[in-house]
Amino acid sequence: MNTYYAANLLIYAGVDIIAVLALNLQFGVSGIVNFSFIVFQAAGAYAAAVLSMPPHTAAEYSFQVYVGGYQLPFPIPWIGGALAGALLAIPVGLVVLRKLRSDYQAIALLVTSIIANTVINNARPFLNGAAGLALIPQPLQDQVDTYGDSYLYLYIGLTAVCVGLVWFLAARIVNSPYGRTLRAMREHELAATALGKNPVALKMTMFIVGGAIAGLSGAILVGFLTVWAPSTWLYPETIILFAALIVGGRGNNLGAILGALLVPVGFEEVTRLLIRMNIGPPNLIPALEWVAIGLFILGFLWFRPEGVRPEPRRVFEGSPDVEVVDRVRTA
């Protein structure tokens, strides 16, 4: 295993872990079926790109057209990516989360994802349309040599720091009284409302926090790839992240990490290996990958809906015995 391959694997794993942790806060803990999640990751990627790139009038960038071009130093583009994801979540959340039931919210968010991709695809003066952006500067490329192994180690370290920060934030939210309120809303929104909680405010908060983390994951990814186009953030990419969360375990941060390693990273590497083995037509293996992901989702939803690592039950002093509660529920 060469250094670049290992670094590529670790960085992709870090990006996927950050993304699935964000989706866990929205879907696993809060019950928001955000089928437009990839849009917020894309917003972070585009924001980081235009913040770090020079104006499109520069000689080497004249083949593409885009807004911005501020050429700001690291880490401002990554911070800008997180802010872009959070800011985009505000209008989307206000439109979708206030009046619609959860099933209609899911449909509306899926439509939002398709519309956003179509708009960016066709609005070339905005972000270069379907061709996307290229020659995106990498973090700290003016200070260090980006072509050596040392830069790969540096990028892995930066990604690991972001994973640690997101993990810390997610753990604090999930294990706090606020996290218990979110789970109460997820389980029974009407009961949470009767206890004086505001479901719309709770959902909006997690929608914005999840959008910010998604934007950060996009900024990290685009800094490594140095290219970004609408074809990289089609709505099926969100389904992969949902599959990771369902397989790993909804509502459990460790389950989210496990799912991110098993599904996005695992399936990508297995697919790459099978393609090298020249099994069948060139498009057979990528097509079978989607079939396998669909079967994975159906299998876990049917046979083990709680995932590989279920959400831990929290029993507090003075609460009734868990077995008694289960018997009452099934009676």
Image (tube, rainbow, N blue to C red):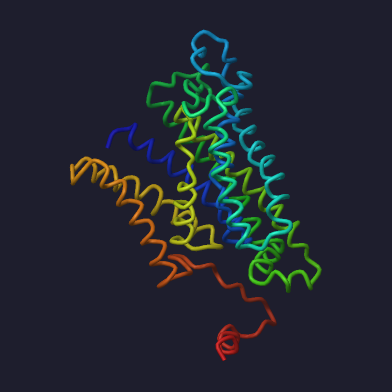
Name which quarter of the figure residue 298 lies in.
bottom left
Please tell me which residue is depicted at 63% across the width and 19% down the height of the picture. Answer: 70
Position of residue 319 relative to residue 230, above or below, is below
Please tell me which residue is depicted at 38% across the width and 36% down the height of the picture. Answer: 8
Position of residue 227 relative to residue 296, above or below, is above
The image position of residue 236, as x and y in percent, is 45, 48
The image position of residue 51, as x and y in percent, is 61, 24
286 displayed left or right of 92: left
Q: Please state the total of marks drawn on the protein image.
A: 0
Position of residue 198 relative to residue 330, above or below, is above
Quarter of the figure that contains the N terminus: top left
Q: Residue furthest bottom?
A: 331
Quarter of the figure that contains the C terminus: bottom right
Position of residue 23 relative to residue 144, above or below, is below
231 displayed left or right of 22: left
Of 291 and 207, nearer the camera is: 291
Q: Residue furthest top?
A: 59
Of 319 and 191, nearer the camera is: 191
The image position of residue 95, as x and y in percent, is 71, 50
Please tell me which residue is depicted at 55% across the width and 10% down the height of the picture. Answer: 58
The image position of residue 133, as x and y in percent, is 50, 25
